[in-house]
Image: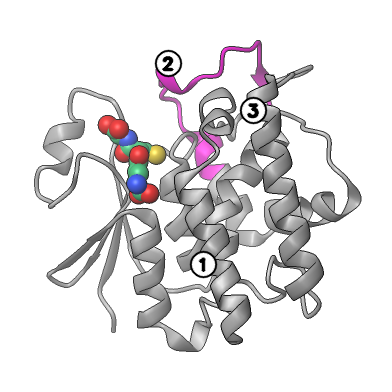
């Protein structure tokens, strides 16, 4: 029995926590969840037992600690090789790593203007030009992956991969903020948003009552 514990933040807001959680739940891998309340007075003391940079997520495997969502996903892909976390073909794998790295290091305006919020929608939301450029780039990435590598299934590289986990929080955002998209992107969003693991995360987020003011978008909203 593999002893895994995943330290995460509030499901409603913690986009980085969703990434490895989604991988584990999609594959029905057993793990324990340790939830930290982000940006509260107790956050530092709740994180104190771990070698954390003050952030979540963090994966604990026996005595080993792995922090940072992408590092955790890499580790899970190695720990469970039969789940095929990365595409089997070398070129597809390189592209998958590229789009994950891009997600990890880019899209600042999309992140700041459209914070993940699973329990609210933002009628009439209009992104700034900068955020709209980020969104268009995400759509281009999805076209690139789906058209070249997605023939054998509905995920970015056909079969479910680490790349889908990295883009899961963006899918949540695009739905909450009702962003227009073409059919290819809509089909991908529907696949992910309606998957069992995503529904489970959204339900947990909607059950939470904490409001983190700094993670609320600057746009009128209503409950989903
Ligand atoms: N690079 C990190 C970023 C993690 C991150 O920023 N997590 C947010 C929660 S979604 C956090 O812990 N914020 C607390 C803080 O900044 O004090 C990763 O990908 O895991």
| Residue 178 falls left or right of residue 195 | right
Mark 2 element type: helix
- According to the picture, the residue beneath numbered tag 2 turns out to be 213
Q: Residue at x 27, y 41 (%)?
A: 55
Q: Quadrant of the C terminus?
A: top right
Q: Is residue 161 visible?
A: no
Q: Dots 2 and 3: beta carbons under 8 Å?
A: no
* Residue at horizontal 28 percent and vertical 63 percent from the top: 5
Q: Is residue 50 left or right of residue 69?
A: left
Return the disc, 1 or 3, that comes first in the chain's sequence: 1
Report ligand 1 position as a quadrant.
top left
Q: Per the image, is 41 magenta?
A: no
Percent of width and height locating residue 203: 57, 43
Q: Secondary structure at mark 1?
A: helix
Residue numbers of the magenta segment: 203-224
Query: How packed is label 2: few (under 14 Cα within 10 Å), some, or many (20 or more)?
Result: few
In terms of secondary structure, where does tag 3 sit? helix
Image side of residue 132 versus residue 88, left or right: right
Q: Quadrant where the N terminus lies?
A: bottom left
212 part of magenta stretch: yes
Please identify the quarter of the rendering in which residue 67 is found.
bottom left
**Sequence-first disc among 2 and 3:** 3
């Amino acid at each position: 029995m593999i002893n895994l514990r995943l330290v995460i933040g509030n499901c409603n807001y913690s986009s980085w926590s969703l990434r490895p959680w989604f991988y584990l739940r999609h594959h029905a891998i057993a793990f324990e969840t340790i939830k930290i309340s982000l940006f509260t007075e107790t956050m530092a003391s709740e994180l104190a037992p771990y070698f954390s940079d003050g952030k979540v997520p963090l994966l604990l495997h026996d005595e080993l600690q792995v922090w940072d969502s992408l590092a955790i996903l890499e580790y899970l892909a190695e720990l469970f090789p039969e789940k095929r976390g990365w595409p089997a073909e070398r070129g597809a794998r390189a592209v998958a790593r590229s789009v994950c790295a891009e997600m990890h290091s880019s899209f600042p305006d999309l992140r700041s203007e459209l914070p993940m919020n699973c329990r609210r929608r933002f009628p009439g939301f209009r992104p700034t030009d900068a955020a709209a450029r980020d969104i268009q780039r995400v759509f281009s990435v999805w076209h690139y992956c789906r058209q070249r590598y997605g023939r054998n299934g509905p995920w970015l590289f056909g079969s479910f991969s680490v790349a889908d986990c990295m883009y899961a929080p963006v899918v949540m955002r695009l739905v909450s903020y009702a962003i227009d998209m073409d059919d290819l992107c809509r089909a991908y969003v529907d696949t992910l948003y309606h998957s069992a693991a995503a529904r489970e995360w959204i339900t947990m987020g909607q059950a939470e009552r904490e409001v983190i003011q700094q993670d609320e978008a600057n746009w009128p909203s209503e409950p989903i």
